[in-house]
Amino acid sequence: MRIVKLLLAPLALLAVIALASTAQAADKDFNGRWDIQVNAKPADFAQFTTTAAWWLGITGAGTPDMKIQFVGSPDGSLDEITVAKIQDGVLHFTWIDRPRRGGAPNPNDRAEYEVKYVHGLLQGTMTSSSTTPATRLTFTGYRSPKIDEHDDGTWVKGKPIQLFNGKDLKGWTGVNSSKAEGWSVENGILKCSGQADDLRTVAKYWNFDLHVEYKIPPKGNSGIGLRGRYEVQIGSDYGKPPGMHGTGALYTRVLPTVNASKPAGEWNTYDIRLVGREVTTVLNGKKLYEKGVIDGLTGIAFDPFEGRPGPIELQGDHGGVEFRNIVLVPLKKRNSQ
């Protein structure tokens, strides 16, 4: 019996070590960049969320130095999450409002998240009592794909595509409804009244050069969504320093070197080039950044699957804005069929 006990003791110790190792590996599974699909229909969204796609970046899971970045609701900014833990294989974190663009935080804006790693995906729940009625949403996270394409001089231009014909909304639809309420065409101008559904192209695109002209009123706010995922910001911030939320920014991701916007009421011209995750933006003839690397989705995103072609999106859920001369030129790899 004594010999058996001596044999069992190291076996038991090995079992404990194995279980500890398994638990540690499970925690580490949370690490990475995650594209998140909110599992709800637009009509079911509470006031806490207006987008169907979020983003989560996690490093150091399974260690005391875990760090979490989150792009979600209600603001759509890139937030550093400071309240987080992994307990019994479940990631818990709290989103808390913070000061933004000079405004005071709303102490009632907060949400609790519980996330599990299940067969290579994240399965999670967001709950918030700061809305009336209270909000509860589920979501699924997919690992962000590797996109190994670079703006390296090997891309050639295809045939230009007029995305807006100057007559009607042919080729466009609303993000949340096919009615595209709040949008109209007048004298060759695409107009948005503000507080409207975002507008998107029916067709989807991958790598491209995009030309867009826009005009915005005082205190206006809009944006251009690339592949329905990455927003190039539009704002009435003429004369202000460049910022991550200002005109020309790849919203909260890439900072422009200069604010090249014109005063409210004047036409501005964007020329935007997207290859893989590298973006180059020129506003009114001034280069804002070249081959800026986009780490992940921004707040405008409604299509989380980064490895697929996506539409061009025009933001309408803020202030009024006008567009014209929207032209996209597809880019193809040289010598590709």
Image (tube, helix red, strand yellow):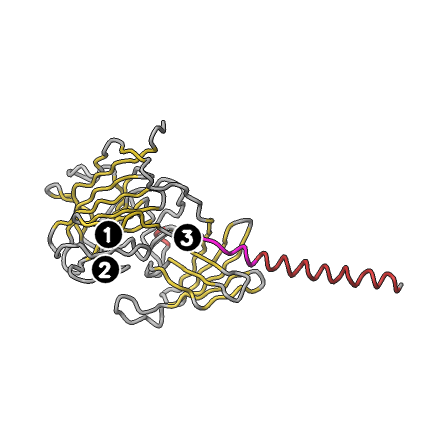
Residue 302 coordinates in the image, percent (x, y): 35, 49
Q: Amino acid at mark 3?
A: Val
Q: Is residue 121 left or right of residue 49?
A: right
Q: Is residue 148 left or right of residue 171?
A: right
Residue annotated with mark 3: 38
| Classed neighbour count for the residue bearing mark 3: other residues with Cα under 10 Å, few (<14), some (14–19), many (≥20) | many
Q: Amino acid at mark 1?
A: Leu
Q: Amino acid at mark 2?
A: Pro
Residue annotated with mark 2: 242
Q: Which numbered marker is on residue 288?
A: 1
Looking at marks 1 and 3 on the same chain, the residue that comes earlier in the sequence is marked by: 3
Q: Which residues are magenta?
A: 27-40
Q: Which numbered marker is on residue 228?
A: none
Residue at the image position 40 percent from the left and 67 percent from the top:
129
| Classed neighbour count for the residue bearing mark 2: other residues with Cα under 10 Å, few (<14), some (14–19), many (≥20) | many
Q: Is residue 37 magenta?
A: yes
| Classed neighbour count for the residue bearing mark 1: other residues with Cα under 10 Å, few (<14), some (14–19), many (≥20) | many
Assess whether mark 2 and mark 1 are in contact (beta carbons under 8 angstroms).
yes
Residue at the image position 31 percent from the left and 47 percent from the top:
291
Looking at marks 1 and 2 on the same chain, the residue that comes earlier in the sequence is marked by: 2
Viewer-proximal residue, 133 or 272?
A: 272
Assess whether mark 2 and mark 3 are in contact (beta carbons under 8 angstroms).
no
Q: Could you tell me which quadrant the C terminus lies in?
A: top left
